[in-house]
């Protein structure tokens, strides 16, 4: 009989790029204390999930001592998951770039989509069209992030990872 604890790690799914990535790029990573980009990047590099984390920031050579890359296309390895922490208006182009590079998962932390009206709705439609073009799975926009407790992977704005948590929840809207 197969060990139930191994079932989720053995069966490939369309969500593997999000919950089982080998390489993660954080677009909008920064060293600015208290910023979402710094918190998410720090959470990822301080949690031993078994993969590599690449900060992407066009104005910095390094973030928290880790070499930074000016764009997704400059990252030297294949990226499975991109975490986007940039203004809403930049997201459609970043999703397009990610799809063109073959990235299959994205977490969009950024706000400023349909919750702000017609302009935000148009941005969401652009994001969705690009994601569908590349078969990309997305969590967000306007979300806190995601955690895979089994792998100690924290793409989240929240602090310490608690081992006793055993649930999956989504709060917010979905792309339509």
Image (tube, rainbow, N blue to C red):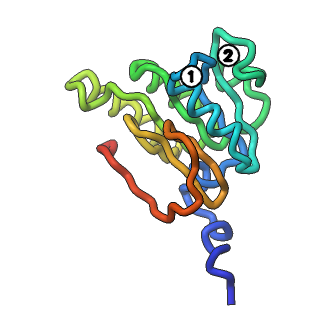
How many labels were placed on the picture? 2
| 65 sits to left or right of 5 | right
Quarter of the N terminus within the rendering = bottom right
Identify the mark at residue 134; answer none if there is no mark: none
Residue receiving disc 2: 70
Secondary structure under badge 2?
Answer: loop
Q: Residue at x 73, y 27 (%)?
A: 75
The one nearer the camera, 5 or 31, is 31
Name the residue carrying label 1.
Answer: 28
Circle 2 Cα neighbour tier, 10 Å, few/some/many (<14 / 14–19 / ≥20): some
* Coordinates of residue 159 in the picture (x, y in percent): 54, 40
Residue in the image at 47% along x and 44% along y: 138
* Picture quarter with the C terminus: top left
In the depicted structure, whether residue 97 falls above or below residue 99: above
Q: Which of 176/69 is in front?
A: 69
Image coords of residue 31 (percent x, y): 63, 18
Q: Residue at x 67, y 73 (%)?
A: 6
Q: Residue 81's quadrant in the figure?
A: top right
Residue 135 image offset from top left, x and y in percent: 51, 46
Location of residue 122 with respect to 144 vertically, above or below: above
Instruction: Determine the image quadrant of residue 117.
Output: top left
**Under tag 1, what secondary structure?**
loop
**9 on left or right of 105:** right
In the rendered image, residue 34, in percent from the top left (x then y), is placed at 52, 23
Circle 1 residues within 10 Å: few <14, some 14–19, many ≥20: many
């Amino acid at each position: 009989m197969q060990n139930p604890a191994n079932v989720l790690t053995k069966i490939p799914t369309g969500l593997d790029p999000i919950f089982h990535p080998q390489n993660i790029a954080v677009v909008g990573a920064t060293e600015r204390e208290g910023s979402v980009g710094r918190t998410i990047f720090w959470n990822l590099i301080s949690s031993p999930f078994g993969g590599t984390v690449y900060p992407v920031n066009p104005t910095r050579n390094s973030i928290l001592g880790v070499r930074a890359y000016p764009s997704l296309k400059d990252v030297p390895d294949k990226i499975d998951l991109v975490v986007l922490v940039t203004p809403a208006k930049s997201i459609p182009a970043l999703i397009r770039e990610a799809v063109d590079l073959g990235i299959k998962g994205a977490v969009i932390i950024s706000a400023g989509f349909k919750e702000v009206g017609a302009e935000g709705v148009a941005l969401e439609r652009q994001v969705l069209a690009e994601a569908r073009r590349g078969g990309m799975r997305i969590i967000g926009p306007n979300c806190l992030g995601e955690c895979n407790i089994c792998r100690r992977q924290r793409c989240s704005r929240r602090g310490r990872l608690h081992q006793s948590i055993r649930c999956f929840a989504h709060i917010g809207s979905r792309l339509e």
